[in-house]
Image (tube, coloured by chain):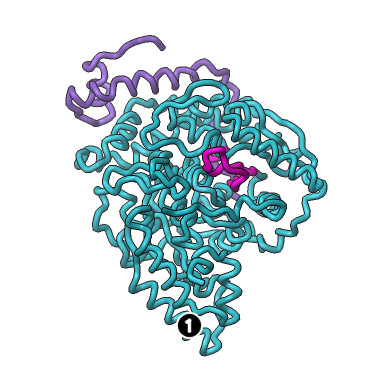
Amino acid sequence: MDEVFGVEALRQAARVAGFAWTDAELQTLRPGVEASLRLLATLDALPLEAIEPTTQYRIL
Amino acid sequence: MSADLAFASVTDLVRMIARKEVSPVEVVRVHLDRIAARDGTLRAYITVCEEAALGAARDAEHALVAGRTVGPLHGVPIALKDLYDTAGVPTTGGSKILAGRVPDADATVVRRLREAGAIVLGKLHMVEFAYGPEGFNAHHGAPRNPWDAAAERMPGGSSSGSGVAVAAGLAPAALGSDTGGSIRIPASLCGITGLKPTYGRVSRAGVLPLAWSMDHVGPMTRTVADAALLLRVMAGYDPADASTSVLPVPDYNAALSGDIKGLRVGLLRAFFLESATVEVREAVERAAQTLQRAGAIVDEVALPAVAHVAAASYAVVASEALAYHTGWLRARPGDYDPEVRKRLQLGAFVTGAHYVRGQQVRALVRNEVDAALARRDVLLAPATPLTAPRLDERQTTLGDGPSDVRSALIRLTRPFNFSGHPACAVPCGLSTQGLPIGMQLVGRPFDEATVLRAADAYQRLGDWHTRRPVLA
């Protein structure tokens, strides 16, 4: 995940999530977004196809 | 006598009050005086309930004099992280957003503790909305780690005030909450005992959430026996919290036999001990040897899937936290601590697919921890890989390389929020700088009794839990 996102891309993504953040805010968020997307990309590389996600939390 | 009472255990206070050796009014007064004298510097409390606490103490005294039946915590003062709802007392989550919010009713666990006779001294400092492990809060400042005379070390968070208050003798016990380590991290950095019960063991009804599927609530005390006493009162099914279990609540104190002969302990070296600083690693290895000399059977075990917990739990926590805060983030973004706001905003860039992958990893981790515990009774690891960092420290060096401080603090606790297993942090040493070192014992789901038995046995074998900071 080496892609660098510009402010416009972040604005659109934030708008999809229902937020209208300023350019200054998005600029501040950009390093964090890039770091978190790099982190999340590690999940994409895992062989998880056969694993059912946790939907219950061991309530007895 | 005042200092003795301020550092008396809950167990001793219960006994002394029941025998009328000391009055609940005197116990509460000692703590209120100490808060007045010390908390201007330590900043553990956001709200002190002086009048209400003294009133409750007088009622407790009258009940004793009248010979009425009293509860297991009769007359004992406690303090609450400021995210537990308290009827008639502000509950803000350490935020400006909820400033002035006064709940009509107590959280379930607060009600249970009051019914058992506990007296609420006040509400404790915390990281805003529990979203951060260092202990910072832009609105209230950072509480001071009492072990550092220069007042420049982190207390740990997010239950920062709970760690400081118990360590400094400003409360004999406190409640914290733990989503990624927020009970065990301040317990480790402040040299006290902190218990994160099994997910579903203790009700979170009336407790402000950070991430519902990882939030746990539990006691922070100076001894394991005290944590056991509080847990028995707090635990159990609550119709107001659908996550709570109907399993019966055992008498945890009855399990504290001191006998660990044959107890099977899995020492977590890879990822856990390997990431710790030399002083922390050696302290935990000495603790393992102490348990072994007492008859425990210690072997080493690895949990390879925990390498993915950082990414997976980030997907879960960021998504759930954003879901809770969306309305305020849109309407009142300027009222957040800027660092907390940024963490919440980043949740907008996590997809639903990543959330589900996070939950798939969660299943892997849970199964792996269950498998490790199938042939062992408890797992042993450092609670934090380092001692309290300086307040201005952002980068550190761990046993396996450089790390930002925030990630380092939550690295070893978060896997068991993700898996839901019970974990108890206890002090196991002091660094050459005189800072506490903490370890954690992890057990099978709903087997807090074994975790507490092992941790209590360790405390009987040593005295790290009796060390006190020298306050300036």
Range of magenta residues:
B416-442
Compare residues B276 and B353 and report the one nearer the observer.
Answer: B276
Q: Is residue B448 left or right of residue B376?
A: left
Residue sitting at the far top: A2
Seen at 45% across and 33% down, the residue is B316
Report the residue marked by disc 1: B61
Q: Identify the amino acid type marked 1.
A: Glu
Q: Please, which chain is the residue tagged with disc 1 on?
A: B
Tell me where residue B76 appears, x and y as whole percent: 50, 70
Q: From the viewer's perspective, is residue B292 above or below residue B43?
A: above
Q: Position of residue B66 (x, y in %)?
A: 52, 90
The residue at the far bottom in this view is B66
**Dot 1: few (<14), some (14–19), or many (≥20) neighbours within 10 Å?**
many
Judging depth in this view, the residue of B400 and A18 nearest the camera is B400
Chain B appears in which tint? cyan
* Chain coloured purple in this rendering: A
Indicate the quadrant where residue B351 lies: top left
In the image, residue B290 above or below residue B223? above
| Image coordinates for residue B305, horizontal then vertical, percent | 60, 26
Residue at x-position 28% and y-position 24%: A29
Is residue B354 visible in the rendered image? The answer is yes
Residue A12 left/right relative to B60: left
Q: Secondary structure at mark 1?
A: helix
Left or right: A28, with A45 as reference point: left
**Foreground residue among B32 and B246:** B32
